[in-house]
Image: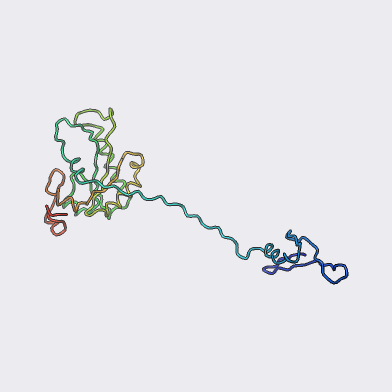
Amino acid sequence: MYTAFSGEMVVMFMRVSLSPGGKKPLLISDTSEKGVVCASHKHNHHMAAASAPPLVAERSRPQLEALEPVQPISQTFPEALVLALSPPAAEGATSHPQQHYIVVDVRSNTEFHKGHIRGSISVPSLDDNPQCVVTAVDAKVTADLEKIRAKGDTGESSAVRPPPPITVVFVSLRSPDLDEEAALSYRDGSALCANGTVSQVTILLGGLFLWLPQYGENDLVTVEFDQAFWKGVLPPPGSPL
């Protein structure tokens, strides 16, 4: 038997001889052009199915790459930031505290000048693209490191010991909000984060919505607080939050 293929049509050729007496046909095994051996008339159907090419080509399935989960941004408690911003109580305190905080305010310039954390820098996230945020914050980190290395309260050279770990805290009116978006952009785009110069990138727990009513009148940690501007926006001082 010979099997030939033409498009989707299968044509089979079979060589037959008669058995002695000429009454019953006898099938003789043969090999088709595709190399399929025909041993019996019972296997004709299976043989044709095995020899026929697939009507639908098997398609390779695209493999999806596993996405790494985004690490969440941690939060800094307001009390910890107040402690870091307050002047040292004891004389002769070291110029290298255990942690150095840099506060980045991502609100508009108008809101910034109606009350902000002392020492913070204004980097409005709605006005600047992520790269501008990275550039501005990196410049602040570099400037602070130069001041720490140049001189300390005790007059010791910073070459003797490394500078303290740096934590960059992003703040907005409410949190998490624009502060978290800016923090993620900075953490993932800054070379100072990649090389370990900046040890932590965080957001302020509760944002300035909780900070200003509690510390707005404290000139040691807050400046330019305009209580009339925030009337009806912030909860009254001393109210339960």
- Coloring basis for residues: rainbow
Tell me: residue 174, above or below residue 42: above
Left or right, 193 with respect to 238, comes to: right
Of residues 164 and 78, the one nearer the viewer is 78
Q: Residue at position x 67%, y 68% from top?
A: 8
Is 175 drawn above or below residue 155 in the view shown? below
Which quadrant would residue 44 be assigned to in this image? Answer: bottom right
What residue do we see at 11% from left, 56% from top? 228
Q: Residue at x 11, y 52 (%)?
A: 238
Q: How many dots with numbers? A: 0
Above or below, comparing residue 38 to residue 101 in the picture:
below
Where is residue 15 shown, x and y percent of the image? Answer: 81, 66
- Left or right of 180? Residue 241 is left
Assign the N terminus to one quadrant of the image. bottom right
Percent x, y for residue 139?
28, 42
Which image quarter: residue 16? bottom right
**Going 26% across and 53% down the picture, which residue do you hit?**
176
Q: Position of residue 123 (x, y in %)?
A: 25, 50
**36 sits to left or right of 117:** right
Tell me the quarter of the image containing the C terminus.
Answer: bottom left
Q: Residue pushed farthest right?
A: 21
* Picture coordinates of residue 177, whole percent (x, y): 27, 55
